[in-house]
Amino acid sequence: MLDAIDAADLVLLAFPLYVDSLPAPVMNALEHIASHRATQRENQATSIFAAIIELRIFLSRITNATALRSAKTFARLTHFEWAGSLAFGCRRRDGAWYAVERVGWTRHSIEEALDLSAESLARA
């Protein structure tokens, strides 16, 4: 995995956010990647780093601020080019994802945001 990350043009971190910080397994993985990249700087491609945050409990843009800062700081400290993030809230119902309509999101708008982001990242 570490060699693949070093050679990648784009690294996309997608994770659920239950409270306001990165989940422990995600933090552990990022620490492992950072340690590796600190010793392998000459073998790394110039990579773009982006994040997708799926809010699970609290559906507020403020909720993702700490996790977003952590992802952005990770990108800077590990010599990735930060490309930004998407954050949205969803819940599972009958095995399918649906947006939480009370905050104005629809499944279509989330899919459109993901499609537009993918197109933009592919051009980067």
Image (cartoon, grey):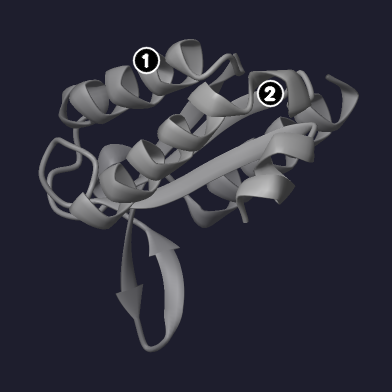
Residue 31 — which label?
none
- The image quadrant of residue 30 is top left
Query: What's the residue at 27%, 56% (across, down)?
Result: 25
Residue 73 — which label?
1
- Judged left or right of residue 64, residue 94 is right
Where is residue 117? Give x, y as percent: 69, 32
Quarter containing the C terminus: top right
Helix, strand, or loop for circle 2?
strand
For label 1, count other residues whose C-alpha is less than 10 Å away and answer few (under 14), some (14-19) or many (20+).
some
Q: Amino acid at mark 2?
A: Ile
Report how far apart the C-alphas of labels 1 and 2 lie in the structure: 13 Å
Q: Tell which circle, 1 or 2, labels the residue nearer the N-terminal end.
A: 2
- Judged left or right of residue 124, residue 13 is left
Where is residue 116? Give x, y as percent: 74, 33
Where is residue 73? Give x, y as percent: 37, 15
Helix, strand, or loop for circle 1?
helix
Where is residue 106? Give x, y as percent: 47, 50
Give above or below for 84 relative to 103: above
Taking depth in this image into account, of 34 and 84 the one nearest to the observer is: 34
